[in-house]
Amino acid sequence: MKRRLLLCWLLALLPPSYAHEVHHAVAAQNAVSVRLTFADGQPFAFEAFEVYAAGSDKPHAVGRTDADGRAVFLPPSSGEVRLRAFAADGHGVDLKFDPPRAGETAAPAASEDSSSKLVFGAGLLLALFGLIQLFVKRKKTP
C-alpha cells in the first residue's frame, strides 16, 4: 500500500515538473561583434549594452560585454542599429552603424577622438620645431 501511495504521489508531481523544463536549439548564425575599450586600451569588460533596431524604442538585444570588451549580438534583418553600452561609473558609448550582413566584414570605425589626436600631434610637432629653432638661434649669436 505504501508503494502505491508513493507511486501516486510521484505521478501527481510529474506534470508540474514539465512546466519548468527549458528546451534548446543550437544553430550557426552570423553574429556581430563590437569591441569596446577605454581610452587607455583597457577592455570595457562586463558592462551592460543594449542594441536597438532603426526607429525602435524597444531593445532588440541586451547583455553584458565579455572579458575582452566585446558586445556580441544577432543584428536585425535589415537597417541601421544603435548600440548603447554603459558602466555604473558613467562611462559609455552610443553608436549608430550598419552592421555587416552574412558574408560581409565591416571596415573598422574611425575613433571618435581622432580629431583631438590629430590636433595634439600637430601641436607636439610645432612645439618641437619651436624648441629646435630656439637652440639653433642661441648657437648662432656670438
Image (cartoon, rainbow, N blue to C red):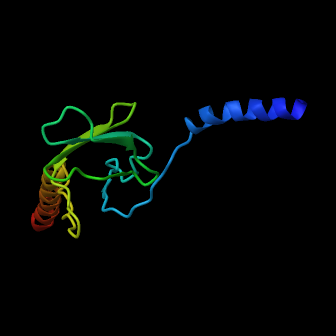
Between residues 136 and 89, which one lies in front from this camera angle?
Answer: 89
Residue at horizontal 13 percent and vertical 61 percent from the top = 129
Specify the quadrant of the image occupied by residue 56: top left
Q: Where, by quadrant of the figure, is residue 105 drawn?
A: bottom left
Whether residue 53 is visible here, answered yes or no, is: yes
Q: 45 or 26: nearer the eye?
A: 26
Q: Position of residue 107 (x, y in %)?
A: 18, 65
Would you place residue 5 above or below residue 113 in this image? Answer: above
Residue found 82% across the figure and 29% down from its top: 5
Q: Is residue 126 left or right of residue 38?
A: left
Residue pictured at 17% horizontal, 60% vertical: 128
Task: Count up the numbered dots.
Answer: 0
In the rendered structure, the answer to whether residue 83 lies left or right of residue 18 reads left
Which of the pair 79/98 is nearer the observer? 79
Q: Is residue 18 left or right of residue 101?
A: right
Name the image quarter holding residue 90.
top left
Q: Residue at x 14, y 42 (%)?
A: 54
Assign the C terminus to one quadrant of the image.
bottom left
Tell me residue 85's x, y (percent).
Answer: 31, 40
x and y percent of residue 38 in the render? 34, 47
User: Picture coordinates of residue 100 (x, y %)?
Assistant: 20, 61
| Figure check: 3 above or below 39 | above
Is residue 142 shown to the viewer in this render?
no
In the rendered view, does 9 fall on the left or right side of 134? Answer: right
Single out the residue that lies furthest toward the bottom. 103
When the figure is inspected, residue 106 is found, relative to residue 98, above or below; the finding is below
Query: In the picture, which quadrant includes the N terminus?
Result: top right
